[in-house]
Image: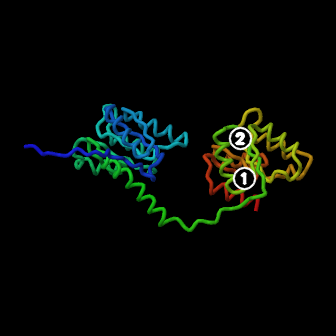
Amino acid sequence: MELPCKISKVSAKIEPIPELKGVRVLVADDDTDTCLSVCSMLREIGMRPDWTNYGKEAVIRAKDALDNADEFRVYIIDWQMPDLNGIETVRRIRKVIGDSAPIIILTAYDWSDIEAEAREAGVTAFCSKPLFMSELRNVMIQPFLASVEKQKEETPEPESKPDFSGKRVLLAEDNELNQMLAENILTNVGLAVDIVNDGTEAVEKMKSSSAGYYDIILMDVQMPKMDGYEATKQIRALEDKEKAGIPIVAVTANAFEEDCQIALDAGMNGHLAKPYDIPEIMKTLKELLG
């Protein structure tokens, strides 16, 4: 039996999905061709894929991504892999990331027998092999649409953006990426920002500037030459009482209670954790700048 079909003169165009643009996704499958094929489709819809052939490596990469604040927001895991099966891989990834990302099981077999166990392990959805673009787009977008709708229901009316125009902040931070992020956040609410790379420079800036030139200092606590704690102690010891009394906020990747106490003991007025939490930064600025 033959079925005649006309050949289209128009190439099918895959449109990126705005909600998924730049979203990082990890594909774990022991078949390299499958990984490459799925990653190619993910790029077509605007996502940022990585892949591995091993379940154990997927778990390690999940933790590494979390530690480096560049989390995978979706996982696509093959059901059957030689070193660690898909369900156990999911179970271990969930221990690392919690419920923060959808995890999709990819399988060439009927999953009805394992569905209950898989759901209990933390699987969000299932996809059949071979995977086609239409199914991939659908399964990718569903969790994000649901998340957006949930946020709309739960999110209260946003407060008006604070305006700190006329205020100037001294940012002491040795990491260039963190400098850029912090500067963007601060200038977006009207603050003028001066940046120094270590505690020594922060102390010198305060000595050389006129009293009242800076309204607040955001002080990274781990910097070369002089750390933020020592820089704060030296600023607090300045003869000019107005300079010595400037609000200083510790900025650190360590957010334990003892770290907050160390900052207070050093003479700091507050404590902010990395990665930057914008609402918390705004709250601190309002408290200290009015």
Amino acid type at image mark 2? Glu
What whole-number distance in Å separates the C-alpha atoms at marks 1 and 2?
16 Å
Residue at screen point 36% across, 34% down? 36
Under circle 2, the secondary element is loop
As drawn, is 99 to the left or to the right of 270? Answer: left
Q: Residue furthest left?
A: 1
Comparing 93 with 214, the one in front is: 214
Amino acid type at image mark 1? Gly
As drawn, is 91 to the left or to the right of 266? Answer: left
Under circle 1, the secondary element is strand
Whether 156 is drawn above or below 180: the answer is below
Comparing 190 with 247, the one in front is: 190
Mark toward the viewer: 1 or 2: 2
Q: Which residue is mark 2?
A: 173
Rendered location of residue 278, percent (x, y): 62, 54
Q: Crowding near pointer 1: few (<14 within 10 Å), some, many (20+)? A: some
Give the quarter of the figure containing the N terminus.
top left
Q: Which residue is mark 1?
A: 270
Give the quarter of the figure containing the C terminus.
bottom right
Q: Residue furthest bottom?
A: 157
Along the polypeptide, which appears first: circle 1 or circle 2?
A: 2
Rendered location of residue 225, percent (x, y): 76, 32
Residue at screen point 37% across, 38% down? 40
Q: Crowding near pointer 2: few (<14 within 10 Å), some, many (20+)? A: many
Tell me the tag on residue 107: none
Residue at screen point 39% across, 53% down? 141
Comparing 213 with 2, the one in front is: 2
Residue at screen point 71% across, 49% down? 261
